[in-house]
Image (cartoon, rainbow, N blue to C red):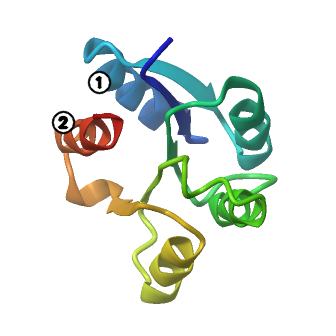
Amino acid sequence: MSNVVLLVEDSDFIRDMYKLKLSKAKIDVLEAVDGAMALSMISEHKPKLVLLDLMMPNVTGLEVLEELDKHKMTPELPVIVLTNIMDKPTIDKAKQLGARDYIIKTDLTPGEVLDKVMTYLA
């Protein structure tokens, strides 16, 4: 698996939609439904990119970013936040913790999100 993306999203519908879009582009997709699972999968599978929702049960997306930043993983592991949280303090915090991009789900189509993913995988 060369182009492995970890999709971290607690909504089955949204996760399935993005998984289908990424898979059709020949991207291998790993799935996590919360931040704790995401951290475990990052450690175990070493994906090339993480698409990370922020609002999740147990461990939030910001907590995932804090953990990755603490272990200095974000410089080599691109993380794209994919959320509907639009407030500036949250956006600033995510970027401060190493998120390469911050996408509001309602602003881009799945195809546009795929284009951004492909840019980071290139």
Residue at 51% of width from left, 88% of height from top?
89
Residue hosting label 2: 111
Please report whichever mark, 1 or 2, sits nearer to the chain's N-terminal start: 1
Residue at 22% of width from left, 60% of height from top?
107
Q: Is residue 54 above or below residue 92?
A: above
Q: Of helix, strand and loop, which one carries label 1?
A: helix
Dot 1, how many residues are within 10 Å of its Cα: few (below 14), some (14-19), or many (20+)? some
In-image side of 19 versus 89 (left or right): left
Report the front residue among 35 and 116: 116
State if disc 2 and disc 1 touch (CB < 8 Å).
yes
Report the front residue among 63 and 110: 63
Report the front residue among 87 and 73: 73
The quarter of the rendered structure image containing the C terminus is: top left
Three-letter residue code for mark 2: Gly
Q: Residue 117 at what x, y percent from top left?
A: 31, 40
Hey, which quadrant is residue 94 in on the image?
bottom right
Hey, which quadrant is residue 14 in on the image?
top left
Residue at 40% of width from left, 76% of height from top?
86
In-image side of 27 versus 68 (left or right): left
Q: Residue 101 at what x, y percent from top left?
A: 37, 61
Three-letter residue code for mark 1: Lys
Dot 2, how many residues are within 10 Å of its Cα: few (below 14), some (14-19), or many (20+)? few
Q: What is the tally of numbered marks visible in this picture?
A: 2
Residue at 43% of width from left, 87% of height from top?
88
In-image side of 30 versus 82 (left or right): right
Q: Is residue 38 above or below residue 103?
A: above
Residue that extends furthest to the bottom in the rendered view of this protein: 89
Hey, which quadrant is residue 32 in on the image?
top right
Q: CA distance from mark 1 to mark 2?
A: 7 Å
Q: Residue 87 at what x, y percent from top left?
A: 44, 83
Q: Residue 111 at what x, y percent from top left?
A: 18, 36
Residue hosting label 1: 21
